């Protein structure tokens, strides 16, 4: 994914929550970039640690290859853990694709058992 540009339109300090809120526009060439890619790009632009950044929202502009982004940059890891919700934390963590692939074959075998059980019940009913 190659980014054309990141423009930060608003940067507000929130000292009571030990964070900085960023709002900006991300331009891209093809598909909307993932939260992790945007997080890395913001960290590079602001020269901060990517683990202290959380992406709150990504909202695409209809028909354009740009998205409005809202992010929070925390001062410490403890502040991040203290103020971030579980939902936002799960969204910003990398996906575990290997676990999902391991579960798929087990799910495929389950319907086959059910079909066999249905046939046995039909034969028993006759």
Image: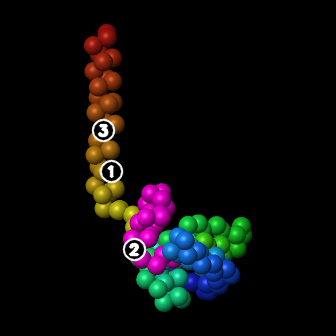
Looking at the image, can residue 91 be seen? Answer: no
Q: Residues within 10 Å of mark 1 (few under 14, many from 20)?
A: few
36 lies left or right of 28? left
Residue at image location 43% in from the left, 64% down from the top? 82
Q: Residues within 10 Å of mark 3 (few under 14, many from 20)?
A: few
In the displayed structure, would residue 8 be above or below residue 58?
below
Q: Could you give the CA–CA distance between mark 2 and mark 1, rounded to whole angstroms?
A: 35 Å
Q: Earlier in the sequence, mark 2 or mark 1?
A: 2
Query: Does residue 89 show up magenta in the picture?
Result: yes
Q: Which residues are magenta?
A: 72-92
In the displayed structure, would residue 122 be above or below residue 90?
above
Whole-percent x and y of residue 101? Answer: 32, 57
Q: Earlier in the sequence, mark 1 or mark 3?
A: 1
| For the residues bearing labels 1 and 3, Cβ distance under 8 angstroms | no
Disc on res. 84: none
Helix, strand or loop status at disc 1: helix
Whole-percent x and y of residue 79? Answer: 44, 70
Whole-percent x and y of residue 112? Answer: 31, 36
**Nearest the eye: 116 or 83:** 83
Residue at image location 33% in from the left, 24% down from the top? 118
Give the residue at mark 3: 110
Q: Could you give the CA–CA distance between mark 1 and mark 3, rounded to whole angstroms?
A: 10 Å
Looking at the image, can residue 8 be seen? Answer: yes
Give the residue at mark 1: 104
Query: Does residue 84 show up magenta in the picture?
Result: yes
Q: Could you give the CA–CA distance between mark 3 and mark 2, rounded to whole angstroms?
A: 42 Å
Give the residue at mark 2: 77
């Amino acid at each position: 994914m190659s980014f054309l540009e990141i423009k930060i339109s608003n940067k507000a300090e929130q000292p009571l929550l030990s964070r900085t809120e960023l709002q900006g526009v991300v331009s891209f060439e093809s598909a909307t970039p993932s939260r992790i890619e945007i997080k890395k790009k913001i960290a590079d632009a602001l020269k901060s640690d990517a683990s202290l950044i959380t992406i709150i929202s990504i909202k695409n502009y209809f028909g354009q290859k740009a998205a409005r982004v809202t992010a929070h940059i925390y001062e410490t890891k403890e502040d991040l853990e203290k103020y971030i919700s579980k939902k936002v934390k799960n969204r910003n963590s990398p996906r575990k694709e290997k676990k999902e692939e391991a579960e798929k074959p087990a799910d495929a075998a389950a319907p086959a058992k059910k079909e066999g059980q249905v046939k046995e019940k039909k034969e028993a009913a006759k």
